[in-house]
Image: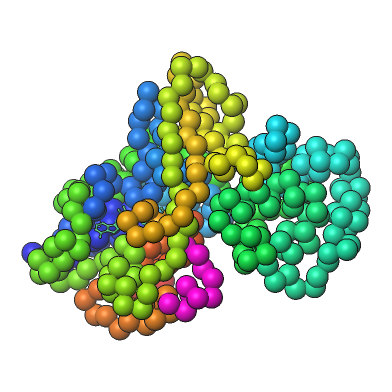
Amino acid sequence: MYDYLVVGAGIFGSVFAYEAKKRGKKVLVIDKRDHIGGNMYTKDIEGINVHMYGAHIFHTSNKTIWEYINQFTEFNNYINSPVANYKGELYNLPFNMNTFYQMWGVKTPQEAKDMIERQREKYFVERPKNLEEQAINLVGLDIYQKLIKGYTEKQWGRDCKDLPAFIIRRLPVRFTFDNNYFNDTYQGIPVGGYTPIFEKLLEGIEVKLGVDYFKEKEALDKLASKVLYTGPIDQFYQYEFGVLGYRSLRFEHEILDMENYQGNAVINYTDRETPYTRIIEHKHFEFGKQSKTVITREYPDQFSLGKEMYYPINDEANNEIYKMYKEKADSETKYLFGGRLAEYKYYDMHAVIASALSMVKKEFYEES
Ligand code: FAD
Ligand code: UDP
């Protein structure tokens, strides 16, 4: 009946479905949730587009991907500039001249570099083995202790000495007065939120919501020649090589009867004691002027089966397990696998789109 069954109406599944339909294929998309969009889903609450699964800022340096996503929406000129609150002291992020001035009163790049050098002298290691060593190497002890240690240990539920160094290298360190959280060429928030992008991608495609693939796998599989699966890879294989580790999150949304709660879209709480990592005030993503506001507190949460999977814990043990699933997946002929859950990967949106488009080229034998 269908050429493709797509399991998951997130960005991977939706881009693939759109491109397959464009090539004349008949596609059925299912999702176990009651909405399209996966984790990029935004919901209108009090006229504000609320990012229901955490703040999503689109950023990329890939012109092709930027032009691709711009077919489906218009982006505003939002630049992500979170502020860190450490026990009532405010600091600009990412780590830049504003942060260094606020932390130490240094006014020039040279003064800042000298200060970091003094701060890391005692701890410097050539090849940082863990997040703590990497962080002190990059920005010195004070910033590590006030802006990194507490936040990271809350976020990951582990000591910084037991976390891989690469996590902290995601953040820019700059010796200019520039609070842009990303280094990418293109950045913004889609005007009207992310959900309309999915409405366009899935226009004219049959979509069934509230359908869990595993509850009727056999019957669903029979409906299509091929299946693109974007859910958790370990679940697909009934956890035969073990359960992959994740860090989960819990979101508490609140409508407040005031125009402006915190004056910024994202404020990180970097001390260890505050139980949440950040508060998002959604209206600021779109420069909203509504009389009410919606805020979300983001609490890190221990993962267990049944909870939402947010951050893959790509340590050695988990990567080994994933390798076994991947080997099996690579040998399938009816099934395709893609996206953050099936590839067990921390994946930004632009990279997921690029990966879906590259699967499309491969699947339809097109030149890249
Ligand atoms: P998903 O969006 O997870 O879609 C998979 C879909 O499959 C889901 O809808 C799920 O319900 C469905 N599914 C799973 N199992 C089944 C089943 N058995 N039956 C039916 N359906 C099923 N990226 C950025 O570029 N910028 C950001 O600022 C950013 N912020 C983020 C903040 C947070 C807190 C998190 C967790 C991620 C963030 N990301 C960000 C990453 C971004 O969310 C992902 O790149 C993107 O959503 C991945 O899309 P996907 O289609 O692979 O997965
Ligand atoms: N981080 C931190 N303090 C902050 C923000 C981030 O120490 O105020 C660290 C933390 O370890 C986090 C990593 O930097 O996991 C990457 O941050 P990013 O904002 O990219 O994380 P995400 O948005 O994925 O949660």
Q: Position of residue 258 (x, y in %)?
A: 50, 17
The magenta region covers 312-321
User: For the stretch drawn in magenta, what is the main secondary structure?
Assistant: helix
Q: Position of residue 196 (x, y in %)?
A: 33, 40
Q: Residue at x 70, y 46 (%)?
A: 147
Left or right, 211 with respect to 71, comes to left
In the image, residue 320 lies in the stretch drawn in magenta: yes
Q: Residue at x 85, y 59 (%)?
A: 120
Q: Position of residue 134 (x, y in %)?
A: 72, 63
Q: Is residue 208 above or below residue 316?
A: above
Residues 13 and 200: in front is: 13
In the image, residue 280 lies in the stretch drawn in magenta: no
Q: Quadrant of residue 255?
A: top left
- Work out whether residue 152 can be spotted: yes
- What sort of colour scheme is used for the picture? rainbow
Residues 361 and 197: in front is: 197
Residues 75 and 214: in front is: 214
Left or right, 224 with respect to 113, comes to left
Quadrant location, the N terminus: bottom left
Q: Position of residue 333 (x, y in %)?
A: 24, 80
Left or right, 259 with respect to 233, comes to right
